[in-house]
Amino acid sequence: MTRFPRIRESALYRTGYFLVSLGVLLLDQWSKGLITRSFEVHQSASVITNLFDLTYVRNSGAAFGLFASVDSSIKAIVLNSVAVLVFLVVSAYALRSSHKSIRLQLGFALILGGAVGNLLDRVRFGYVVDFIDFSISGHHWPAFNVADSAICLGVGLLFLDMLRTEDEDRPEPRAAEPPRL
């Protein structure tokens, strides 16, 4: 009888994590759609002068433009296969991990939402839409998007989860219940 409340609790937590992933995906796709409708490729608009611009870039490579200059017919297959593999591995590990490990599960949810957002772009367009452009003193960070940001935050949460102390791993001792009459 006590098993059913745990199942409901697990389903509630997992639904919340799914909604985080879905929220990342929707925000990512909405923001990319807004940029592609409002900007021409390589067009830029300054948000904070000499610090932050919106610049529409088509990234045919991996994260932050890695491998963009590689001209190979199998590049898209490799990048999409890696994205699908990451999705499957992260999903499997998230489902096998405790639903109560909030930091870990949020990290997984952010990574999954971001990975699916970028994968959708690759499948639909053959490239990923990037538009967030930071620079300091003329030195530009490679353009990125909401999905990339979610993936980085998710990896950061996973890293923090790995650093947790043993005390955080131990469950709280439960108070003894009074005997039932």
Image (cartoon, rainbow, N blue to C red):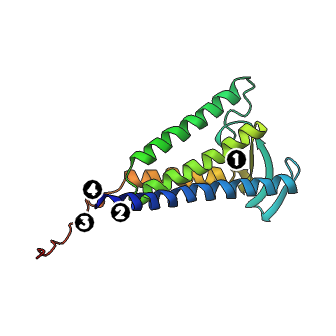
Where residue 11 appears, x then y in whole percent? Answer: 45, 58
Of the image marks 1 and 3, the number of the one nearer the N terminus: 1
Task: Decide which of tag 1 and tag 4 comes sooner along the chain.
Answer: 1
Q: Which amino acid does label 3 sit on?
A: Glu
Amino acid type, callout 2: Pro
Q: Nearer the viewer, mark 1 or mark 4?
A: 4
Q: Which amino acid does label 1 sit on?
A: Pro
- The nearer-to-camera label among 2 and 4 is 2
Report the Cα–Cα distance between label 1 and label 3: 45 Å
Which mark lies nearer to you, 2 or 3? 2
128 up-or-down from 134: above or below = above
Q: Which amino acid does label 4 sit on?
A: Glu
As measured in the structure, the alpha-carbon distance from the residue carrying label 1 to the one carrying label 2 is 47 Å
Among the 4 quarters of the image, the one containing residue 19? bottom right
| 3D distance between C-alphas at marks 1 and 4 | 38 Å
Q: 101 or 15, which lies in front? A: 15
Which residue appears at 28% of the width and 60% of the height?
Answer: 1
Quadrant of the frame with the C terminus: bottom left
Quadrant housing residue 7: bottom left
Is residue 64 visible from the viewing direction of this image? no
Q: Nearer the viewer, mark 1 or mark 3?
A: 3
Foreground: disc 3 or disc 4: 3
| Crowd around label 1: few <14 · some 14–19 · many ≥20 (10 Å) | some
